[in-house]
């Protein structure tokens, strides 16, 4: 029997036939590709990929879902988010849309409201949305000024356990690096992060203490087996060169853990020679870069009564061309740093293609929300289609890039372990008890 893409077979072994796949996310399959897309049959058995075969060649006796050339993607990886900030817009909006407005609004909201119950409810809401959209891996930064670091990491550890079979979760301690002078606080923060299996991070800024801060951070990370994920140069000031300082610190300290830098906006504002030297250092240091196109387009170059003059994003193509691991991510969701968003990786991808010009050609573009972020997060087992891997998939009616990128793909179907999940999104009214109606 043949089923439609909207209702794949409910069977132990079946075929998603006549599918269109982004070749960059498919393992062990060679076929002629057009714009990075290939036609294939996908055999699923007991919740795993059994085989990826040329279109029309799957065993005829198997139950089939004819996708009629609809796209099939692996579930997404979103590796720079802020689940602890999410959805506070209703009680703490940004008065002017600027970075400083966001910083002040979030700081006041955190002091007034971020109890364990408050953080948990908003975090759960965000995860339910991401899961319904088709995401299987999320890394979140958690505001970690004292005493919030203990509250939020305790909640995160509980939520990670609850969601372990749906979304793989990682957490980064986002703390004020000037607070490192408080040795007791910093030691406690490192212990909390280590015990939670998290990463250490922070917001870097130019200043006389930057080299000491980075050396102290890298030493603590090395001593405790922690990877590092930093917020870097989120400004339009061409004089902000902390990305260069981070690369130099990696090399100076011979740090062999993973290092990720998010934002890196000022790199695009610098003279070509200055930027090129930094890109070379980043490549040598082995740093990965995450661009946040929606949030940075929202915040950067925002001045009263003036149209923005630039897109706010980093030198994404130049970094990738240098062999540097690069990806895009959601960043903030309905909070003062970004008033919109729903942790929908399809929206992130669509906007990244437009803002970063990832098109013409689109051959490898799908990597930026699948294989590349999964690799950056050290989860090489996720966001791929290949024999023996879990059949975690997102099915689309769109057949070509133009169709995919021109609509929000609201009719998508998400499979986890080969089974269709309920894609109902949580109602915003559920948050009224914490953020107000």
Image (cartoon, helix red, strand yellow):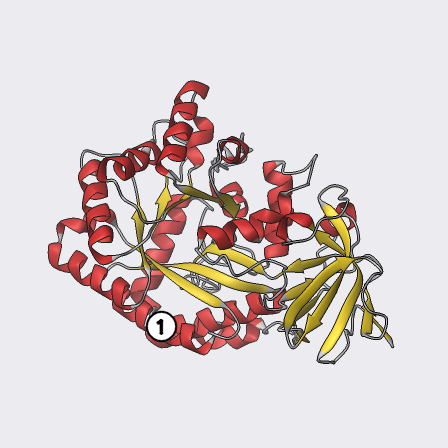
Q: Is residue 28 left or right of residue 40?
A: left
Which percent across, then down, holds residue 156? Answer: 37, 70
Toward which corner of the image does residue 100 lie, by quadrant? top left
Look at the image and tell me whether residue 243 can be seen.
yes
Q: Residue 293, how many percent across, how many down? A: 53, 44
Percent across and percent down for residue 123 are 45, 69
Up the image or down, 253 lies above or below 22; here it is above
Q: For the point 28% across and 59% down, which residue is it?
A: 144
Mark 1, residues whose alpha carbon is within 10 Å: few (<14), some, or many (≥20)?
A: some
Residue closer to the observer: 140 or 54: 54
Q: Which residue is mark 1?
A: 157
Task: Give me the residue at 48% from left, 52% from top.
Answer: 375
User: Residue visible at 37% across and 33% down?
Assistant: 284
Instruction: Give 46 or 336, whichever is nearer the viewer.
Output: 46
Q: Quadrant of residue 415?
A: bottom right
Please state if 87 lies on the left or on the right of 362 as rendered: left
Q: Left of 350 or right of it: where is 335?
A: left
**Residue 338 seen in this snapshot:** no
Which one is in front, 388 or 364? 388
């Amino acid at each position: 029997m043949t089923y439609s893409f909207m209702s794949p077979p409910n069977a132990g072994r079946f075929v998603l036939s006549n599918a269109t796949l982004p070749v960059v996310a498919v393992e062990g399959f060679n076929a002629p590709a057009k714009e990075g897309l290939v036609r294939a049959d996908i055999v699923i058995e007991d919740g795993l990929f059994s085989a990826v075969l040329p279109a029309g060649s799957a065993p005829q006796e198997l139950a089939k879902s004819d996708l009629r050339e609809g796209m099939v993607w692996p579930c997404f990886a979103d590796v720079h988010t802020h689940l602890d900030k999410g959805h506070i817009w209703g009680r703490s909006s940004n008065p002017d849309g600027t970075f400083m407005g966001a910083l002040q609004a979030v700081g006041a909201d955190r002091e007034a409201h971020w109890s364990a119950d408050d953080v948990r409810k908003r975090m759960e809401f965000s995860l339910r949305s991401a899961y319904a959209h088709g995401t299987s891996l999320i890394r979140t930064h958690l505001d970690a000024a004292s005493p919030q670091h203990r509250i939020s990491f305790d909640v995160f550890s509980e939520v990670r356990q609850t969601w372990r079979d749906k979304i793989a979760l990682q957490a980064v301690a986002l703390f004020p690096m000037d607070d490192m002078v408080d040795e007791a606080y910093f030691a406690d923060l490192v212990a909390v992060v280590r015990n939670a299996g998290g990463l250490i991070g922070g917001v870097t800024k130019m200043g006389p203490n930057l080299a000491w801060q980075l050396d102290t951070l890298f030493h603590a990370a090395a001593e405790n087996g922690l990877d590092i994920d930093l917020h870097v140069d989120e400004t339009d000031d061409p004089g902000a060169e902390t990305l260069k300082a981070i690369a130099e610190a990696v090399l100076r300290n011979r740090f062999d853990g993973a290092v990720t830098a998010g934002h890196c906006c000022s790199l695009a504002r610098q003279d070509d020679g200055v930027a090129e030297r930094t890109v070379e250092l980043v490549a040598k240091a082995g740093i990965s870069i995450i661009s946040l196109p929606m949030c940075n387009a929202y915040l950067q170059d925002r001045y009263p009564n003036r149209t923005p003059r630039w897109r706010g994003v980093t030198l994404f193509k130049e970094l990738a061309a240098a062999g540097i691991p690069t990806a895009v991510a959601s960043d903030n969701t309905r909070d003062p740093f970004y008033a919109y968003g729903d942790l929908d990786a399809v929206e992130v991808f669509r906007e990244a293609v437009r803002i970063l010009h990832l098109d013409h050609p689109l051959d490898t573009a799908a990597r930026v929300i699948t294989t590349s972020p999964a690799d950056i997060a050290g989860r090489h087992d996720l966001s791929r289609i290949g024999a023996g891997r879990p059949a975690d998939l997102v099915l689309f009616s769109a057949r070509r890039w133009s169709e995919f990128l021109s609509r929000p793909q609201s009719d998508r179907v998400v499979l986890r372990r080969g089974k269709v999940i309920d894609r109902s999104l949580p109602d915003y009214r559920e948050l009224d008890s914490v953020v107000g109606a």
